[in-house]
């Protein structure tokens, strides 16, 4: 049998289609999500409904965003699930979570076994809607989950770690082996829970400054801060902020990145910031 065909559907590589096939793992994920009637649940990439069905069983209504036209059409005609679903056949990268939350008058609980080819840009897309999101549960490559949870000093610590931990408490939930999917991916996977803070622990005045500093610092992660960020912060400024210029990007905590961002925002003209984004 063709290993890319599952439940009669040919898995499309370009959409990162690896379908969950393990009932025990599926049940564990749904229990971790713990959907409750009345909540605004939005699934990214429902596919063949491995998670959609058991989540939908616990709800009267739910919303899904699926890019694959054939899969979206199948869901529409699904006998039990179809009538409960609001289906957006579109790219989740273009979905306006803030507008949807405002329309429905409640914060969204987002979940999904994400297509691995776009999981990192999708996370950044979601970070721009934190005010509209109550929590998120995602299956990702284990390596991406390691980066999300990594603390300063660790090899996995990078821009994704800083931005995720700026907005959210990040909690690893479950590891998932490759055989739990059809077709079998080459990598291990893991489920992570992201809980946006009600009150951000280290708020920044301008998120673009944090984005710029982390991009530049981790873009040259082997260099010392003196070299990677020297054009933005003089040795005196780093000393004033109690940051050792001989350290590297991976040694700086989220709080220190936020301090750097606030210093930069208050010493930069607004037009200089906007040119960066
Ligand atoms: N949820 C199903 C499961 O667990 O078996 C499918 C997961 S599969 C890894 C990823 C799903 O996301 C596929 O259904 C794929 O078509 C869909 N997808 C891929 N790119 C997408 C995008 N940009 N926006 C929305 N859905 C997307």
Image (cartoon, rainbow, N blue to C red):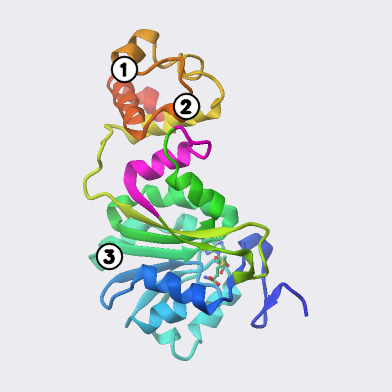
Quarter of the view holding residue 219:
top right
| Distance from the alpha carbon under mark 2 to that under mark 1 | 15 Å
Residue in the picture at 48% in, 23% down: 248
Name the spot of residue 98 as percent of width and height, x first.
Answer: 32, 56
Circle 2 — which element? helix
Q: Which mark is residue 116?
A: none
Disc 2 from disc 3: Cα separation: 41 Å
Residue density around tag 2, few if under 14, some if 14–19, many if 20 or more, within 10 Å: many
- In this figure, which residue is indicated by the disc labeled 2? 249
Quadrant in the rendering for residue 245: top left
Question: Is residue 102 shown left or right of residue 18?
Answer: left
- Asked whether, in this view, residue 221 is left or right of residue 137, the answer is right
First along the sequence among labels 2 and 1: 1
Examine the structure image and report whether residue 165 is included in the region drawn in magenta: yes
Q: Which quadrant: the C terminus?
A: top left
Determine which of the numbered discs, if any, sits on residue 242 in the image.
1
User: Does the stretch in magenta take in 182?
Assistant: no
Q: Residue under label 3, please give it.
A: 103
SS at mark 1? loop
Please state the extent of the stretch shown in magenta in the rendering. 153-171
Q: Nearer the viewer, residue 122 or 76?
A: 122
């Amino acid at each position: 049998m063709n290993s890319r065909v599952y439940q009669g559907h040919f898995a499309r590589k370009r959409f990162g289609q690896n379908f969950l096939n393990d009932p025990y793992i599926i049940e564990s994920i749904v229990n971790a999500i713990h959907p409750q009637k009345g909540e605004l649940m939005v699934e990214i990439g429902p596919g063949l409904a491995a998670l959609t069905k058991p989540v939908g069983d616990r709800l009267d209504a739910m919303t899904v965003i699926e890019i694959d036209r054939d899969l979206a059409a199948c869901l529409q005609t699904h006998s039990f699930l179809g009538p409960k679903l609001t289906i957006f056949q579109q790219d989740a990268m273009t979905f306006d979570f803030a507008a949807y939350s405002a329309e429905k008058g409640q914060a969204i609980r987002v979940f999904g076994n994400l297509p691995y080819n776009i999981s990192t840009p999708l996370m950044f897309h979601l970070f721009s809607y934190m005010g509209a999101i109550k929590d998120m549960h995602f299956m990702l490559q284990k390596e991406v989950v390691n980066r999300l949870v990594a603390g300063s000093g660790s090899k996995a610590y990078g821009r994704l770690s800083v931005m995720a931990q700026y907005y959210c408490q990040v909690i690893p939930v479950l590891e998932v082996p490759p055989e739990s999917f059809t077709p079998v991916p080459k990598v291990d996977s893991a489920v992570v829970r992201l809980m946006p803070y009600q009150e951000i622990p280290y708020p920044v005045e301008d998120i673009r400054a944090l984005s710029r500093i982390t991009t530049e610092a981790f873009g040259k992660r082997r260099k010392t801060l003196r070299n990677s960020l020297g054009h933005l912060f003089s040795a005196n400024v780093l000393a004033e902020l109690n940051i050792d210029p001989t350290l590297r990007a991976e040694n700086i905590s989220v709080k220190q990145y936020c301090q750097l961002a606030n210093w930069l925002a208050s010493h930069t003209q607004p037009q200089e910031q906007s040119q960066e984004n």
